Amino acid sequence: MTTHIALLRAVNVGGRNLVAMADLRALLKHLGLSDPRSLLQSGNLVFGSPARPAQLETMLDTEAKRRLGLEATFFVRSAPEWQTVIARNPFPREARRDPGRLIVLFLRAAPKAASVAALRAAISGREIIETNGRHAYIVYPDGQGTSRLTVALIERKLGVQGTGRNWNTVTKLAALAAG
């Protein structure tokens, strides 16, 4: 049994795509996933399963829509993959200094190098981005709220879907997964 972390994209934001974390935990339990837990109200789940992350993403996307009417995309990583995300953070100083302004974008697939270059060329502010496989690390020195480097722009340039979590949430989920 492997511990996994699942992130939902675009739930409970701005009064749209609302879902209770209790309903998500119940769904996971019904699907046979062990010890489902949640963090915050933004779709962060931890659970156990012998299945691979890609299998879990497909199953959760389908079953959330079928059973809860929830149009959401799940991004699943195993606990060891999550630890690798933390270890490969190219911005350790920013993580210590201002973890709320360091975002990890969890992607469905690794973007092509040309797409990453196109994204960097589209940055008009002081944001900095580094990618590593299916993850993008973004520093928003002036905050995300006023930045023109939006998730929509990032997805359009990279050509893949993603969902972001700030460094505080990334480390809290690691602790929850560790037990």
Image: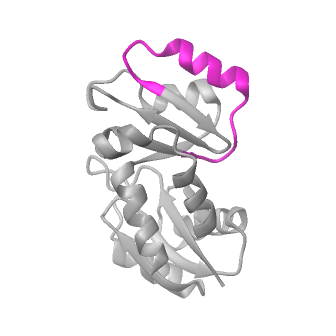
Residue 138's place in the image compared with 95, above or below, is above
Q: How is the image coloured?
A: one colour
Identity of the residue drawn at 57% across and 57% down: 75
Identity of the residue drawn at 41% across and 78% down: 37
Residue 80 x %, y %: 62, 66
48 and 179: which one is in front?
A: 179
Residue 83's place in the image compared with 120, above or below, is below
64 and 141: which one is in front?
A: 141
Identity of the residue drawn at 30% across and 65% down: 40
Snapshot quadrant of residue 79: bottom right
Snapshot quadrant of residue 34: bottom right
Residue 78 x %, y %: 62, 67
Instruction: Please identify the residue farthest to the front as the structure is shown.
Output: 93
7 and 93: which one is in front?
A: 93
Residue 44's place in the image compared with 140, above or below, is below
**Image-based side of 64 in relation to 92, left or right:** right
Q: Which residues are magenta?
A: 106-128
Q: Is residue 34 visible?
A: yes
Check residue 108 for magenta coloring: yes
Q: Quadrant of the N terminus?
A: bottom right
Snapshot quadrant of residue 119: top right
Q: Is residue 62 visible?
A: no
Identity of the residue drawn at 67% across and 23% down: 115
Residue 100 x %, y %: 30, 44
Check residue 22 for magenta coloring: no
Residue 163 x %, y %: 49, 46
Q: Quadrant of the C terminus?
A: bottom left
Question: How many callouts does the rendering have?
Answer: 0
**Image-based side of 2 in relation to 9, left or right:** right
